[in-house]
Image: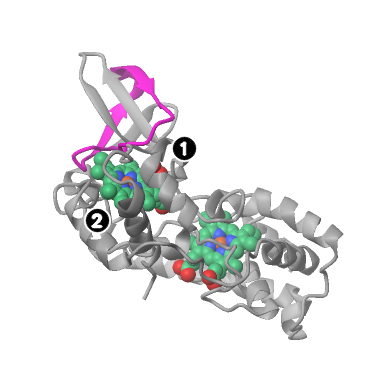
Amino acid sequence: MRLQLRALHSVTVTVSTVPDYTAAGASGFGLRAERSVTLDGMFPVESTRRQGFLPAALLLASSLLWADGLAAQNVLSKALQDRVQENPHTTEADVEAGAKVFRRSCSLCHGADGTGGDGPDLTRGVFRHGSSDAALFRNILTGIPNSGMGGIYQPDKSIWQVVSYVRSLSRGGGEEEVPGDPRRGRLLYMSRGSCSDCHRLDGSGGRIGPDLSDLGWRRAPAHIRASITDPAESVAADYRTVEVRTNDGGVVRGVLRNEDRYSIQLFDEFENLRSFRKTDLAVIDKPEESLMPPLSSFFRGRDLDDLVAYLYSLRPE
Ligand code: HEC
Ligand code: HEC
């Protein structure tokens, strides 16, 4: 069993993150090229968010792998078998141990302080996929199918400790009260600051920045506010700015998609996926700033409150 698991552990489903560039025109591209993350202690669940078409064989292969991983984890987890309902590891030392695992295996997606990133804000104390100890345990152990959230390969005890840590982050009360009028904020979003040039919302808009359709679930209000007034402060991990200068003097700026020793791929400001051989480039610069311009001069006071209230109200179906 153990051997089999080890073998499983080393399998990675590789989705080519270099799709056919010719398809990357105005209509966008079938597979959103995102880096697939394999983290320490996570078993391999292909973590590329699927958008649109994926070859059926690949889908099948990854779902088989998923099912296998799941079955293997279920066999190993005594807590799941015994249907343990309550967290048996809740001391302060457990919370601390859980914090360590969290930093290593979860913070990349859920943020160093748990307030969200690619994955949702975990500090609200209410969870869409279940808020009981047993539900948290299961979701952390097995991951959530067809999402970026893979399972974690750890003994039951450490998983309970992570559950304790996640609980310790809880601000309580679920939703935060935010000042501002979301309806007015929606009108501002549509009329000022060109947000939809770069962001998708409910299926329309640009693709340079993150999709904002479920922003209020993924992010705490303070983060949303800071993203608008000071985007450079915390640039989302998947949206690092890169600027390259070619040997013949052309400059291309965009969001970094992929990089290896010989080449670099970026999504430019006109939504084209561009690939360069490094030998053709004079300069590769990765400034700390965001491609999103600071918009504090467009939004302040009540306008900013309203816009934040609107964005915070955006939830998944
Ligand atoms: C590769 C990114 C990634 C990593 C790493 C990751 N998560 Fe997640 N997590 C997500 C995403 C994305 C979701 C949302 C899934 C969905 O519903 O679509 C999620 C959902 C969750 C949920 C359910 C939230 C809810 O509202 O029900 C919990 C709890 C959670 N993650 C905890 C963790 C913990 C603890 C770790 C570390 C052991 C971890 N995650 C690692 C991306 C990640
Ligand atoms: C020129 C393109 C561009 C425009 C215009 C733009 N953004 Fe952005 N935005 C980005 C990019 C790229 C990112 C990701 C990098 C970062 O985190 O700063 C981003 C990030 C964000 C985030 C953080 C998302 C997250 O998941 O953490 C929010 C919120 C946001 N933008 C809101 C807005 C709003 C509201 C407007 C209009 C008032 C706007 N943006 C206009 C490109 C843009």
Q: Please say if 79 is above or below 7.
A: below
Instruction: Point out the stretch of residues depicted in magenta.
Output: 267-293
Quadrant where the N terminus is found in the figure: bottom right
Q: Position of residue 180 (x, y in %)?
A: 37, 62
Q: Position of residue 261 (x, y in %)?
A: 44, 27
Query: Which one is nearer the viewer's eye here, 159 or 174?
Result: 174
User: Under tag 2, what secondary structure?
Assistant: helix
Q: Quadrant of residue 139?
A: bottom right
At x 36%, y 76%, the residue is 317
Q: Please say if 52 is above or below 77.
A: above
Query: Which one is nearer the viewer's eye here, 315 or 222?
Result: 222
Residue 280 part of the magenta-drawn span: yes
Mark 1 nearby-residue class (10 Å; few <14, some 14–19, many ≥20): few
Earlier in the chain: of badge 1 and badge 2, it is 2
Mark 2 nearby-residue class (10 Å; few <14, some 14–19, many ≥20): some
Identify residue type, mark 1: Glu
Identify residue type, mark 2: Tyr
Tell me: 165 left or right of 306.
right
Q: Position of residue 39 (x, y in %)?
A: 60, 50
The residue wearing badge 1 is 233
User: Under tag 1, what secondary structure?
Assistant: helix
Dot in front, 1 or 2 = 2
Q: Position of residue 193 (x, y in %)?
A: 22, 46
The residue wearing badge 2 is 189
Residue 111 part of the magenta-drawn span: no
Whole-Å distance between the Cαs marked 1 and 2? 21 Å
Q: Farthest residue toward the front?
A: 301
Tell me: 46 left or right of 189.
right
Q: Please say if 257 is above or below 282.
A: below
Query: Which one is nearer the viewer's eye here, 284 or 66?
Result: 284
Q: Is the residue marked 2 within 8 Å of ligand 2, measured from its CB?
A: yes
Question: Circles 1 and 2: CB distance less than 8 Å?
Answer: no
